[in-house]
Image (tube, rainbow, N blue to C red):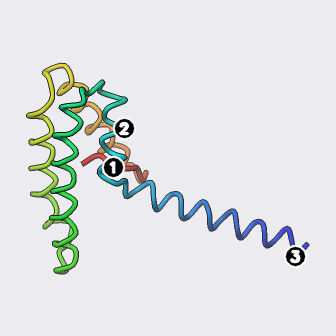
Amino acid sequence: MKKFLLICCFLIGITAVSRAQGMRMSPEDRVAALKTKLNLTDDQSSKILVIYKDAAAKRDSVMKAGGDRSAMRPIMTATNDKVQAVLTPDQQVAYKKMMDDMRAKMQNGGGGGGGN
């Protein structure tokens, strides 16, 4: 019985950690996901990686300064605009749909990984 409870606690802990990590994807993970979903070229991937790394640094500095979600919004908007500027028109349509789907999912109480 003790082993069973220990295993259950362990599994719950693993699940919580994996969900928390899924909500905060690294810039590299985000680019890899976009590369798969949007068929990015290597040039596009490298440009978007720079954009995401810059945004992550800005977000971290805002968070350290005690900023809230409203302080993050301009960073997110600028990041999305910069990413869209790198994409082809077809990729822009797919990217916008991905972002809209992610926003809808988050508004419905779901989590979700990355998507700036």
Comparing 1 with 55, the one in front is 55
Left or right position of 33 against 69:
right
Q: At which x and y percent is residue 111?
A: 42, 53
Mark 2 = which residue? Answer: 33
**Distance from the alpha carbon under mark 3 to that under mark 1:** 38 Å
**Quadrant of res 40:** top left
Residue type marked 1: Gly
Separation of marks 2 and 3 at Cα, in angstroms: 40 Å
Q: Give x and y (percent) for residue 19.
A: 50, 58
Q: Secondary structure at mark 3?
A: helix
Query: Residue 28 in the image: x percent, y percent?
Result: 32, 48
Tell me which amino acid carries mark 2: Ala
* Circle number at residue 2: 3
Q: CA distance from mark 2 to mark 1?
A: 9 Å
Name the quadrant containing residue 17: bottom right
Q: Earlier in the sequence, mark 2 or mark 1?
A: 2
Q: Nearer the viewer, mark 2 or mark 1?
A: 2
Amino acid at dot 3: Lys
**Label placed on residue 114:** 1
Evaluate if marks 2 and 1 touch, with contact meaning CB atoms under 8 Å apart.
Answer: yes
Which residue is drawn at the image coordinates 33% and 42% (left, top)? Answer: 102
**Residue 36 has which mark?**
none
